[in-house]
Image (cartoon, rainbow, N blue to C red):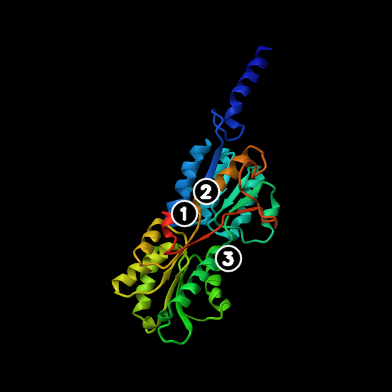
Amino acid sequence: MKKVLLTALIIMMALPLFAGGQQEDGAIEVGSNIYSFQDNFMNGVIKPELESYSEELGLDLSIVDSEGQQAKLNDQVDVFITKGVDVLAINLVDPASAGSIIEKAKKADIPLILFNKEATEAGIMGTYDKVWYVGTNSAESGIIQGEMMVADWNANPDWDKNGDGTVQYVLLKGEPGHPDAEARTTYSVKAFTDAGIGVEQLALEADPNWSTTHGNDKTAAWLTSSFGNDIEIIICNNDGMAFGAINALKAANVVLPVYGVDALTQALQHIADGEMNGTVLNDGVNQARATLDLAKNAAMGSDAVAGTDWVLDTDGTKAVRVPYVAVTPENYKDFF
């Protein structure tokens, strides 16, 4: 009898070590990542907000850098699962690889919140009842950016250098295949054609890192190319690349309209200084907050959006969409 009681006591003492990832104080453990700490927006807005808001919610957050490598992210998820976290909050490196992450979470019966990079495989979100997505409507940022450019083009006839009624543009594109990069590239230009304005693409260069260095180097090369004097607008998929374009323009003593996406503080200052014509608020603060709100609810077994203002799409994507907002010389002060 004594041996039986001793064995039972040992098992009861060990249970807190193996029954899920919650700490002794009851804090929910969240295993999370950023696809690359080199990304201006992800590391400058979303990561710090995840960290600060997790403290506000009383969550125990572990956040790692996937360094732009899907294989590294796969290993990190395995480590989180082995550790026994209560919920995963994952920023995919490759949106096409969402299925493998979802399968890992499903096998371990751990709730999963994907954020900022949406799965591209149709129907994949329906394969697990404990997976949700937090992000944006990718097309919306391109549409808003395009509408700003159309309005400014119509208000500034001198931007049409050769008077041909056609916009000669160059475009700094983000990561090829990234839903945001593809949508922003398509819809920003489509706004011109929808408005009956002709367009001519002089050059387009993509960068998987969405980097300022890329924006600087490509713009500098374009300005000294055979079509350098023909460029009328520089379209950028994000603010980071726009900063590089602005640096190159200043170095060459050239003034051209520049548009970005993200509404980073530096972008607001460039707008204030007349060096940037517009950007689009990519609301990383609320993306981070929605991610953790859903993570907490999911870990507790509650409805994902219970007690929050977030609303899930009704189209089966199981997504919370945080809206974009146009930021212009007229309203940029509202976003500082």
The amino acid sitting under disc 2 is Ala
Residue at mark 1 = 42
Position in image of residue 43 (x %, y %): 44, 52
Image depth: mark 1 or mark 3 in front: 3
The residue that appears at 59% across and 58% down in the rendered structure is: 118
The amino acid sitting under disc 3 is Ala
- Between disc 1 and disc 2, whose residue precedes? 1
**Residue at mark 2 to residue at mark 3: CA–CA distance:** 20 Å
Indicate the secondary structure of the residue bearing disc 2.
helix
Position in image of residue 250 (x %, y %): 31, 70
Badge number at residue 139: 3
The amino acid sitting under disc 1 is Met
Toward the viewer: 8 or 210?
210
Q: Is residue 51 left or right of residue 217?
A: right
Badge number at residue 288: 2
Q: Quadrant of the C terminus?
A: bottom left
Answer whether labels 1 and 3 touch (C-beta < 8 Å): no
The residue that appears at 43% across and 82% down in the rendered structure is: 160
Toward the viewer: 190 or 122?
190
- Image vertical order of residue 15 relative to residue 330, above or below: above
Position in image of residue 20 (x %, y %): 60, 35
Indicate the secondary structure of the residue bearing disc 3.
helix
Count residues near mark 3 (Cα–Cα under 10 Å), then give few for <14, some for 14-19, many for 20+: some
- Between disc 1 and disc 3, whose residue precedes? 1
